[in-house]
Amino acid sequence: MAKCKMCGRKGLFLWVSKNGLCKACDVIAELDIRQRTRIINDCMKLADKSKNIKTKLSRCDLLIEHAQVLFEYECKEIPTISPLPSQLSQEYTIKRDQIVLESTTTDVEKALAKAEIAATARTSINEANKALIKLLEAKKEIQDRVRLDKLDELEARVRHFSHETQLNAYIEEARKAEFKGQKKKALDQYQEALFFLRNDDIDDSLQEEKIRDIQLKISELSD
């Protein structure tokens, strides 16, 4: 007994196409698949060849959206497109993650390069903060754990840079004040540095030497 794979109608005299669909469903499915296939093919070209990151990402998104609709046909064993919709969806989800990773890495590296040559600590930290914002936004978009791990590593680098820059700024100000004989200002900056180390996200046991050295300077200046 013939049965339509799409609407579920069945009967001894029901006509079904080579795709296993009744006449009405066959017309609808053929048109839908043809239109979505055209859109997917256009998206593949732009996602692969465009130099504009936003265009590449939007085409990946659109392709995945249409591939997921075609996947419903695939599940009913109705022929659609080659590669299969499930394969295309997986392939371009991975591709999208890679685009986000590469784009974010490039932007973060540029921000860090600016931060490293900035004239002031404040400017350096501002550039690093811009990089952190890009990283946090990118991490919301990526699904693949391996690529997320790479962004985590990059984030750790940026946070370490910001931490060292801020700490060094306090210590540098303290040393300048000491050199100028401004004992009170020097003491204040060393105390700022100590407070910073005591209240950061790093275990104090990992920065014992820095804490000890600053405490020693505070003790010297407090006499």
Image (cartoon, rainbow, N blue to C red):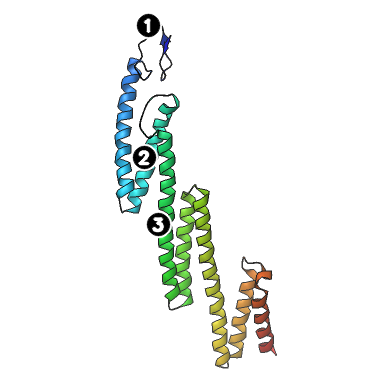
In the drawing, does residue 74 fall left or right of residue 174? left
In the drawing, does residue 169 fall left or right of residue 15? right
Going from the N terminus, do you reach mark 2 or mark 3 first? 2
Q: CA distance from mark 2 to mark 1?
A: 39 Å
Which image quarter: residue 6?
top left
- Asked whether 222 or 138 is in front, the reply is 138
- Asked whether 200 or 85 is in front, the reply is 85
Q: Amino acid at mark 1?
A: Phe
Q: Residue furthest bottom?
A: 181
Q: CA distance from mark 2 to mark 3?
A: 20 Å
Name the residue rendered at 44%, 46% in the picture: 94
Against 219, is 42 above or below? above
Against 16, is 75 above or below? below
Q: Residues within 10 Å of mark 1 (few under 14, many from 20)?
A: few
Specify the label residue 103 is tagged with. Answer: 3
Specify the label residue 13 is tagged with. Answer: 1
Which residue does the numbered mark 2 point to in the structure image?
63
Q: CA distance from mark 1 to mark 3?
A: 58 Å
Pick the quarter of the image with the N terminus. top left
Secondary structure at numbered mark 1: loop
Name the residue rendered at 54%, 83% in the picture: 172
Q: Amino acid at mark 2?
A: Leu
Image location (x, y in percent) of residue 97 = 44, 49
